[in-house]
Image (cartoon, rainbow, N blue to C red):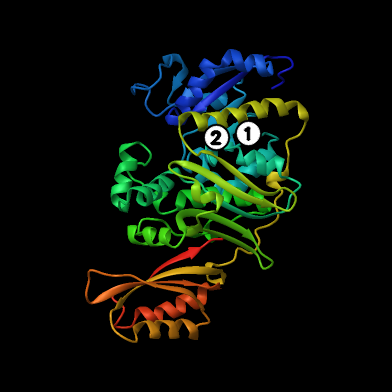
Amino acid sequence: MNHKNSQTVGIGLIGLGTVGTGVYRVLQGHAASLEKKIGVRFEIRKIAVKNISKKRAVKVPRVLLTQNPQELLDDPKIHIVIELAGGIHPAKEWIERAFAAGKHVVTANKALLAEHGSEIFKAAQRYERRLGFEASVCGGIPIIKSLREGLVSNEISQLLGIVNGTCNFILTAMSEKSIDFLESLAKAQKLGYAEKNPAFDVRGIDSAHKLAILARLAFRQEISFESIAVEGIESLSITDIEYAKELGYAVKLLAIGKKQKEGIELRVHPALLPLDHPLSNVKGVYNAVFVHGDQADDLLFYGRGAGMFPTASAVLSDVVDIVKKIEAGPVDSALSAMLPAGCILPITDLRSRYYLRFQAADKPGVLGRIAQTLGKHHISILSVHQKESENAKSVPVVILTYEASEKDLRNALRTIDAQKDISEKTVVLRVQR
């Protein structure tokens, strides 16, 4: 495509769900404005959907609809394919065929990029096509472009992200409304913030997909998705959220990437954040990513992480970016020229402070034995908080530790949880500073 000779850019859209509908509406409603801004007219030439007869939230001329994505790939007047169908297959094959057909691609497919990113980026390089994927992480927040371009001269040592709006909404409701996980989830589903099957969100898998993409860009190396340690929020208790609040912490599901001398930490799990940390005040369905670079220092990217129009905004940002860069020459090879997959540190190598809640028998000597076992495993106690309980036989005991080894902690808890005076499995939350 040479837009110096042709002022019309043909668009092929695969998928007309929430985001696809947003893209269609924006292109239809802002076509004149976009043409005035960049001197190019965008024309949607074909939209691939599963069911042409389905009732939709937007009126689309039937002539634009097809159930066969190959029609988009074969159309020489389509220059950019926007893939919004999701899933791994056949989305991967559609994208690779689009490159082979000489088309550029924009996608919001986080799962595909997290699990098969290397193959996709190398295919783009092989066919000298461009790939935009801003919409794959954090909706309308321009975190991808910032890591790819704005912070390219920085050595990034840390990123912390609240990257799943469903989980953040649930945790905010649990904290502010004092309602449990299931009730908070039901509220999120009723408001349309959670899927009917929320497993990918609440188990942390969605956040891990996004972390894999961010870590690839931040640390400039291949990332194996399977190497990311993942824990979700489905077993979180309102009790621990309220205790954490009393101690000066908020509980958030964090996507964490840290560059250490020995390798890279990549983990997703609920964590305690001090109330004065910038991410502690990110509430509801909002997302935020905290980044530390050696030159830019601390940066916070904040905004709506999902939704029709924020995500459509990110998609169209990529479309415009591709059009602007086409005349710049060969595609940027940086994404396909990452360092080989390096050492991703196992979670057992982690050193952290910990929040521990024991359900212990209310009798002399129990706390002493817990403390003694922790000490034997090189875990020092920062503070102890014993709570009153309606249960006369046991009481909750909350301990905050100094920094300790995850491996040592697990070994200690195996011994403690086996004691007859401990009635439930110990609750463990990591403290992020």
In the visual, does 404 lie left or right of 146? left
Q: Secondary structure at mark 2?
A: loop
Q: Position of residue 232 (x, y in %)?
A: 42, 56
Residue under the point 72% across and 29% down: 325
Q: Position of residue 111 (x, y in %)?
A: 50, 46
Residue under the point 57% across and 70% down: 351
Q: Image quadrant of residue 141?
A: top right
Q: Which mark is residue 140?
A: 2
Residue 275 versus residue 428 in the image, above or below: above
Q: Residues within 10 Å of mark 2 (few under 14, many from 20)?
A: many
Q: Position of residue 295 (x, y in %)?
A: 75, 50
In which quadrant of the rendered image does the C terminus lie? Answer: bottom right
Q: Image quadrant of residue 262?
A: bottom right
Residue 374 versus residue 268 in the image, above or below: below
In which quadrant of the rendered image does the N terminus lie? Answer: top right
Q: Is residue 270 visible?
A: no
Q: Which mark is residue 100?
A: 1
Q: Secondary structure at mark 1?
A: helix
In the visual, does 43 lie left or right of 369? right
Which of 59/398 is in front? Answer: 398
- In terms of sequence position, does the residue under pointer 1 or pointer 2 come before the other? 1
Q: Which mark is residue 367?
A: none
Dots 1, 2 in contact, CB < 8 A: no
In front of the other: label 1 or label 2? 2
Amino acid tagged 1: Ala
Q: Is residue 225 visible?
A: yes
Residue 28 versus residue 87 in the image, above or below: above
Amino acid tagged 2: Gly
In the visual, does 389 lie left or right of 78? left
In the visual, does 201 lie left or right of 132? left
Q: CA distance from mark 1 to mark 2?
A: 29 Å
